[in-house]
Amino acid sequence: MRITLRSKCLSALALATLLLSGCGAPGGGLNIVLPRIIVDIDKDGNPSVAGISPLALSIFGIDPNQFKIDPATVQKLTDSNVQHLELLFRKDGLYTWANAKPAVPLVWDDGSFQNTQDLALKFVALDPSAQGVLTNVLLPAARSSEQNIVVRFPRKDGEAEIPLRDMGGALPEPGTAVDPTTFVRMHISFDENGTPSIANISTKDIQAATGMDLSTAALPIENVQQMMTAGIQHITIRTTPEGIKLWSNDKPLPTLRWSQDTLTSTADLVGQLQLIDPAIATIVKQFLPYLNTLDANLVLKFPTGGAAAIPLP
């Protein structure tokens, strides 16, 4: 009975997703705005959606424990007065809010979204049928609709309730250009063993000359091998007036698009989180609002394995 129910549910989900994908296909001009989903987390970390516990999903063979959050994490979020987190997935990006205050969003266009999808599939092995459903049905359907999820946590004693953001309200706007005050230009090359070098001087050379322990700067060999297998010769990270831009080889990836408001509210959130070491939280809160004054260009280079060199973006 369980297998039959699961098969029927999966078939219905695939059909519904396929229909949504067709509605939002290029030329259709239709965007599906789904109802907001509110997930309530109790003090023990058990989630429920509109009063429906994941326990009810066990009849479909789904383990309810996979949705549970560590009670200690819930308590720290409550002590931090994080009453709710919101995620909004749209065709152009992923927007997030904490206590209705905007965090720095991750935005993309068709090209950078496709590049990210292609990159992820190089690291996550899927069988051909699962990959086909993901790339041809699920992801196109997701991008043709707006999904809005709010996760609410127990409220701290004595704290006033913070209202949710109005659904359909204004999204964070890109920031205006700010004159940079700090400039960083750095290329870091990793060899086959994961040892980094800057200007042809490796951390092993620096360690031998100074006695400093720089072993934590090295990458695990398996990570370097993964990069080589995926054909990734370099990762480029640049700050711009719009935000942090990323490239895998010469292909653009999504952008962390900031503004002064989102940088400040993100810094405030990090500063109050008890999940983070207080010393680190203090540093982040102090410097994050000024990240848009940084003009940085960081390139991480990996062994090519004899392949033709790919130009930097």
Image: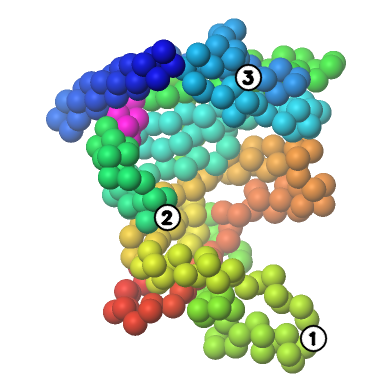
Q: Which residue is drawn at 48% across and 46% down?
A: 257
- Quadrant of image for the C terminus: bottom left
Q: Give the range drawn in magenta.
A: 138-145
**231 and 270: which one is in front?**
231
Q: Residue 166: x and y, percent?
A: 52, 17
- Disc 2/disc 3 C-alpha distance (Å): 30 Å
Element at badge 2?
helix
10 Å neighbourhood of mark 3: few (<14), some, or many (≥20)? many
- Disc 1/disc 2 C-alpha distance (Å): 36 Å
Element at badge 3?
strand
**198 and 177: which one is in front?**
198
Q: Can you identify the residue that label 1 sits on? A: 211
Q: Can you identify the residue that label 3 sits on? A: 47
Q: What residue type is labelled 2?
A: Phe
* Mark 1 vs 2, N-terminal side: 2
Judged left or right of residue 201, residue 119 is left
Q: Nearer the viewer, mark 1 or mark 2?
A: 2
Instruction: Determine which of the numbered discs, if any, sits on residue 93 in the image.
Output: none
Instruction: Determine which of the numbered discs, if any, sits on residue 123 in the image.
Output: 2
Q: Residue 38: x and y, percent?
A: 55, 16
* Mark 3 vs 1, N-terminal side: 3
Q: Residue 26: x and y, percent?
A: 18, 33
Seen from this angle, which residue lies furthest front? 1
Q: Is residue 70 above or below residue 230?
A: above
The answer to whether residue 177 of the structure is visible from this angle is no
Q: What residue type is labelled 1?
A: Gly
Element at badge 1?
loop
- Disc 3/disc 1 C-alpha distance (Å): 51 Å
Seen from this angle, which residue lies furthest right? 158
